[in-house]
Image: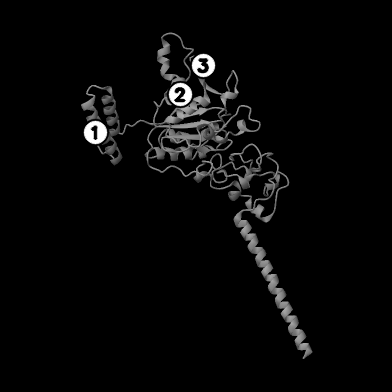
Amino acid sequence: MKLKRRALLKSALVMASIMTLSKILPDDKMLKLAADEARKILQGDEEPIHIIWVHSQSCSGDSVALLNATDPSIVDVLIGQFKNIGEVSLDFHQTLSPQWGVDVIKGGKGDIAKEWDAVEILEKAKSGEITPMLLVLEGAFPDESKAGEGYWSSIGSLNGEPIKATEWLTEAANYAAAVVAIGTCAAFGGIPAGTPNPTGAKGVYEILGKDYRSGLGLPVINVPGCPAGGDWQTKTFAHLLLTVKSLLPPPELDEYLRPVFLYRNTVHERCGRGIWYSAGKFSKEFSQPYCMYELGCKGPISNCPITTIPFVEGVGICTEYGSVCIGCTDPRFPDSPLSPFLKALPAPTVPIETAAGIAAAIGAVLGASITYKARKAKKEIEVKKEGSE
């Protein structure tokens, strides 16, 4: 059997641990567990990477977008099409998982069905029994202290009591290799957190705090969008899965904790209508093909992958198909300055390269004008001088 260097090192460490433990705890069950782990490593039969995906205040739009991903598709991720990632297990998803609650099952069948209990998966994730785990959150998380005698958001029930989403999140995040906030609601609060925000909704980052770090030493990773494109999601997952396997460094994040490789550019910088902006040609109606700035486009202030990674198989770019950008990836969405969506920004935002070009052009024109006037004045002096002679 050919053994990779990484597997050799891992199995050697486990074996050394077994030898040490055997002198201290000769009959302890931990020895058997350690031996089983070494066997799995040697046979290439390691535990899969687990994904726990939980919705809170959400419309499930991000999950729908995920199912439309093609580069890669979610199926490619889950069946191990990525070299060196190995098995990936989607253990929990409120609309995709086969598991259900078993409280209603009575009699002898209850024990059989227990292994299919979705709530049991949540409890295991919360207590650190599912590792390594990517914790994916969709939707905003409310402030339950504002709910009075009721509650705002639950993700199931246990012994007749609701499992409140925000409370569950704060415990489960302690055991996550990485925490990913999918969609603007999970990332920044989004529509549920828009003014007046009666539930006190927040993004995952605000719930866990600025000092939070996952098992990989990462803060919350935000993949905003309303919804976030499916390919934006799977590309982020693929990167993090390779990070878990120590095959890639963690993704670089911007000031809003978004992956830079996705959110580096504004919509305006890569928009196919951008040439009309530079030319000062703006659409006055939605049927016109020019820059959409005057109709309320927020592309100049919105960092978003849509112009380079469209929604489905290279198709679906808001501004190129006749809509304005409403800034749905921005932390301030849906409030001002993103809204009103069809109202133009206060003043044109001219890209640096465009401004430099305009300045150069003005300079060239002024320079030519000054030179022309100087030459003309010199010629007039020379003519007068010749006449006086």
Number of residues whose C-alpha sits closer than 10 Å to that of mark 2, classed few (under 14), some (14–19) or many (20 or more): many
Q: How is the image coloured?
A: one colour
Marks 2/3: CA–CA distance? 14 Å
Residue 255 in view of the camera = yes
Disc nearer the start of the sequence (3/1):
1
Q: Which mark is residue 16?
A: 1
Provide the residue designation for mark 3: 161
Q: Quadrant of residue 200?
A: top right
Eyeballing the image, is 326 above or below 53?
below
Number of residues whose C-alpha sits closer than 10 Å to that of mark 1, classed few (under 14), some (14–19) or many (20 or more): few
Q: Secondary structure at mark 1?
A: helix
Of all residues, the one furthest to the left in this rendering is 23
Asked whether the beta carbons under mark 2 and mark 1 sit within 8 Å of each other, the answer is no
| Image side of residue 51 versus residue 139, left or right | left
| Image side of residue 148 versus residue 388, left or right | left
Residue 89 in view of the camera = no
Q: Nearer the viewer, mark 2 or mark 3?
A: 3
The image position of residue 128, as x and y in percent, is: 40, 27
Marks 3/1: CA–CA distance? 45 Å
Q: Which mark is residue 65?
A: none
Query: Which kind of residue does numbered mark 1 sit on?
Result: Ala
**Residue in the image at 70% along x and 42% along y:** 343
Disc nearer the start of the sequence (2/3):
2
Provide the residue designation for mark 2: 122
**Residue in the image at 40% along x and 13% along y:** 111
Q: Quadrant of the C terminus?
A: bottom right
**Residue in the image at 52% along x and 38% along y:** 222
Disc nearer the start of the sequence (2/1):
1
- Nearer to us in this view, 40 or 125: 125
Marks 2/1: CA–CA distance? 34 Å
